[in-house]
Structures are given as C-alpha cells and as structure tokens.
Image (cartoon, rainbow, N blue to C red):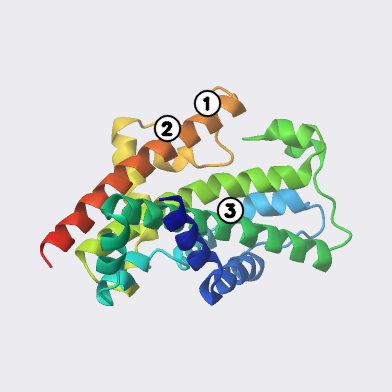
Amino acid sequence: MSKYIFMDIKRAVISWKFLLSIIGIAVTFYLFGREPIRSSTLISTYQLNIYQVQILLIYVISIVPYSDALCQDIEQRFYQALIIRGGITSYSVAKSVGIFVSSMLTMIFGTELYVLILKIRYPQAIWIVNDEVQGAFAGVIERGMYPAYIFLCSVQLGLLVGILGMFCALISLYILNRLLALSLPIIIYYIMSYVSGIVSPKYNFGMIYDPWYTINENEFFSFLITIGVTAALFVILQGLIRRKVRGRLCNG
C-alpha cells in the first residue's frame, strides 16, 4: 500500500497542475485581496484576505491538482489494472491520500508564495503590531514566530481543502464529470456548514477550520478538534470511496 500512496502523491505533486495551482492561489490572494498599506501589517493583511470572497475561489484552485484523479482513471479504464495488481483497499486509500495531501500542500505552498510576494512588493511593511494578537495561534505571534503563524493558518485551511477535495472525488464517482468535480468545493463547504450548524450552532464545520476561532480561547484544544474532525471525515470519505470503487468494479 505504501508504494501506491507514494506513487499517487508523486503523480499529484509532480505535475503542471500542482505548480499552476500554487501560483494561482498566490496570484488570487494578491490581485483580489487587500494590500498592506499605511497602518496595515503583513499578518493583518493575510488575516483580512482569508475572510474575503476570493477565499472561495482559492478553495477551488486548491483541489485542482488531483481531485479529478478517480474520475480520470475511470474514464480511461486505468483503475481496473491498478486494482487487480494491488487490491481495492490499496487503490482507494492511495487515491484518497493523494487527493488530500496534494490539496493541502497546494494551499500551504500557495500561501507561502503569496506572503513572499508581499515581502518583496512591500519591504517596508512590518509583520504585526501588538493590538492585532488574537484568534488561533495567537501564542505563536506573541513569541514572535510570525512565519510560523502564517504556516499554521495555511495548514488549518489546508486540512479543510483536503477534505473538500475528497468530497469532490467521491461525488465524481457518481457523476463522471471532471469539470463538475472541480466546481463543487464551495457548494460542499456551505452545505457542510449549514448542516453542522443545525447540530451545533456555536461550532459548525466552517468554524472548525477558521484560523481565528478558538474554543474558550484554548488554541491547542481547538486545533486538536480540527485534526480530530479531519481524521474522522477522512476515514468516512475514504470508506465511501472504497465502497463506490468496488461497486463500479463489480458492475464493469
């Protein structure tokens, strides 16, 4: 199974789509987001931009590298040979990991490229001022670890797009349309936020992955919940993907 996982991750990240998606995220942040002008700082600019409407487009861009992989394999009848060699479980797990990891890395690298562009374009901009310390990972800011703060926020959003990518991959097994699979993250995000909001109005799906939201101002506990929910959703979605792949194989 490890060989399959490695092959899928390699296939996902060593591709022109992965590189273009990273650039696309950075460019989208830069062109459609706010600039660090006057009293703005680099961190406040980043914080504001992840709450602008362009973040929805960034969710879509993040899943582009590999979320259509299952749909592509089925269209080309490639999945049958891989399953015969390694089994349904190895195939579905490897695809799930490849989709999740590539989406997450795209978000992380795209964010880092965007911050680098800001540093080059606005060399006079400072990282932060004292009264801006708030939200998740505030302790990291207080320690002066500003790049680490940006990285942790991008990881949290990366976990989100990883799960959204898996949702899209699952739907693509029912509707074999690669373009449709890549256009669903926004819809899925709002549906999950709405449904989870009915069950838990004070801590819905969107809040779980919100870099500014913490439970009782406990950064570690909040991030632990994010990781736990992500792991649970990954297992559930991977199981559904495996079941659907097995159904498609049985039906020819």
Helix, strand or loop under label 3: loop
- Examine the image and state in which quarter residue 124 appears: bottom right
Marks 2 and 3 close (CB-CB < 8 Å): no
Tell whether 160 sits left or right of 119.
Answer: left
Instruction: Give the residue at mark 2.
Output: 203
Q: Out of 28 and 89, give the one closest to the viewer.
A: 89
Instruction: Give the residue at mark 1.
Output: 215
Question: Residue at 82% of width from left, 37% of height from top?
Answer: 144
Rendered location of residue 156, percent (x, y)? 55, 44
User: Quick one: label 3 or label 1, which is nearer the N terminus?
Assistant: 3
Instruction: Give the residue at mark 3.
Output: 50
Which residue type carries mark 3? Answer: Ile
Helix, strand or loop under label 2: loop
Which residue type carries mark 2? Answer: Tyr
* Real-space Cα separation, disc 1 to disc 2, in angstroms: 9 Å
Marks 1 and 2 close (CB-CB < 8 Å): yes
- Examine the image and state in which quarter residue 95 appears: bottom left
Question: Residue at 61% of width from left, 55% of height from top?
Answer: 108
| Disc 1: CA contacts within 10 A as few (<14), some (14-19) or many (>=20) | some
